[in-house]
Image (spheres, rainbow, N blue to C red):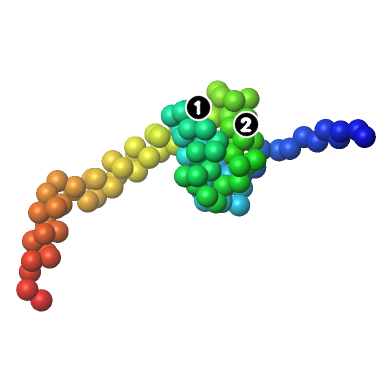
Amino acid sequence: MSLVIALEPAPIETDPHGVVRVAKTRVTLDTVVMAFLEGCTPEEIGEQYPSLQLPDIYLVIGYYLRHRDEVHTYLEERQQQASLIRQETEQRFNPMGIRDRLMARRNQPR
């Protein structure tokens, strides 16, 4: 009996918005990589995100380990985008005093 060695591509894909996700799920590459970097095992990641298959988690982590520089560049770009979106949102919708405004609105007679 001979073992056939087959290369398996990482199950990741980029959605129309440029976000890299684990294929056929809504879980982002960011999520898996950050959990791994925080010390989670693939099994723990699978428990936190049941839509992920354990073999896919291992393949995604393997991809990360082989492409650290590219993935870190991607993660930094995502963090910068998130920061810009947060700043734009806070300029449009001032978060200062939001709790007081919501409580006042809640207590208004209808």
Counting other residues with Cα less than 10 Å from the Cα at mark 2, is it few (<14), some (14-19), or many (20 or more)? some
Label 2, label 1: how many angstroms apart (C-alpha)? 12 Å
Q: Secondary structure at mark 2?
A: helix
Relative image position of residue 57 (x, y in whole percent): 59, 39
Q: Nearer the viewer, residue 40 or 110?
A: 40
Quick one: quadrant of the N terminus? top right
Residue at left 39%, top 34%? 80
Residue under circle 1? 72
Query: Up-down: is 40 above or below 103?
Result: above
Residue under circle 2? 63
Residue at left 46%, top 28%? 39
Q: Is residue 82 left or right of residue 21?
A: left
The three-letter amino acid code for the residue at tag 2 is Tyr
Relative image position of residue 33 (x, y in whole percent): 50, 33
Q: Nearer the viewer, residue 55 or 76?
A: 55
Quick one: quadrant of the C terminus? bottom left
Relative image position of residue 73 (x, y in whole percent): 50, 27
Q: Is residue 82 left or right of residue 28?
A: left
Residue at left 23%, top 45%? 91
Q: Is residue 14 visible?
A: no
Q: Is residue 34 left or right of residue 82?
A: right
Query: Up-down: is 2 above or below 110?
Result: above
The three-letter amino acid code for the residue at tag 1 is His
Residue at left 34%, top 39%? 84
Farthest bottom residue in view:
110
